[in-house]
Amino acid sequence: MTDLSDLKPWQWPESHWRRRVDKVRAGRTLAPAWPGAKRCAVALSFDVDHETNELRDGGKSLGRLSWGQYGNRQGMPRILRLLAEHDVPASFYVPAVVAMLYPDEQRAVVAAGHEIGIHGWIHELNSVLPREAERDLMLRSADALERITGTRPVGLRTPSWDYSDATLAIIREMGLRYDSSLMADDSCYELMEDGERTGVVEIPVEWIRDDAPYFMMSRFEGLRPHIGPEDVLAIFMREFEGAYREGGLFQLTMHPHIIGYRSRLWIVEELIRAAKAKGDVWFATHADIAAHAATAL
């Protein structure tokens, strides 16, 4: 029998590449009519990474740790004030280590009516973990968020949107209602595993609808912001207008230590104003979007 690990992808038998494609795949689209005869849904989300991006990589850069702390000291207060001012709900995906560093922050998020979701333990990459380590970290993360906030999360966003072969099976074991880490559609869909239905709703993300690719900065690498805030707003606005025209979902991913600056947060406010001006847009948490999409299962 041929050891497939010794083969290049172009040498794989058809049965192998088909299994690879079918491991985690989009099933049927879940797009029931929006509640209250709304034309479009807007789901804002914030990945509250704070210091864990640097801690995951060893925590050697005190400068990058301080950048993460900015997310707590300035980014989150500004974001929560903005959402309160416009009475808009959002979803916050929080590594357990962040929740333990800043428990009052997470309690404030829940007290304001927003959703807290799982975002790993220390922003680890699932694809490099042994299955049992990934499972242990996901379970401990859910327990930590529940202990701190009093609410058990119902959804997951994997750190860095990174999936292993075990991730979906662990999601199912934990009884989570939805995932928001994959990119197979603009609309919600049911996740399939090895060709079988799972009942898990996917709320798809996309790098186009994420602040990090536009604004990330690394002093020692060729990673520099290369686009102005006005241009980022234009991209996000086109995505929203397309979703509205199609009667679909506009999902946006942001980070407090990236979008939370005075010269950037106005982007979120402009999007909220534009969506509210339509008069028939449903602002909802990812949990609410998933619960509604699940009615089509």
Image (cartoon, rainbow, N blue to C red):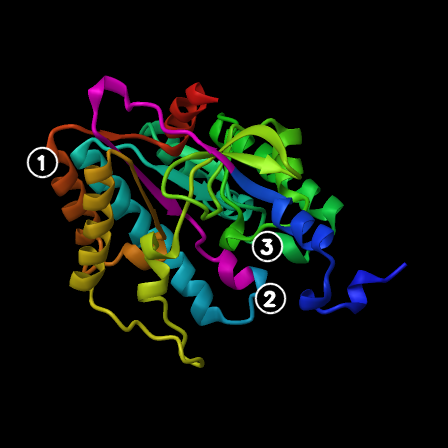
How far from the left and from the top, in percent, is residue 50?
43, 54
Residue 9 vs 104, above or below: the answer is below
> Upstream in the sequence, badge 1 or badge 2?
2
Q: Which residues are magenta?
A: 27-55
53 within the magenta span? yes
View extreme (left): residue: 277
Dot 3, how many residues are within 10 Å of its Cα: few (below 14), some (14-19), or many (20+)?
many
| Residue highlighted by disc 2 | 58
Label 1 SS: helix
Q: Give whichever of 104, 182 is nearer the camera.
A: 182
Q: CA distance from mark 3 to mark 1?
A: 40 Å
CA gap, disc 2 and disc 3:
11 Å
- Compared across the picture, whether 220 is left or right of 209 comes to right
Image point 24% across, 49% down: which residue?
A: 239
Instruction: Judge left or right: residue 230 versus residue 8.
Output: left
Name the side, left or right, on which 194 lies relative to 212: right
| Mark closer to the observer (1, 2) | 1
Q: Residue at x 17, y 36 (%)?
A: 85
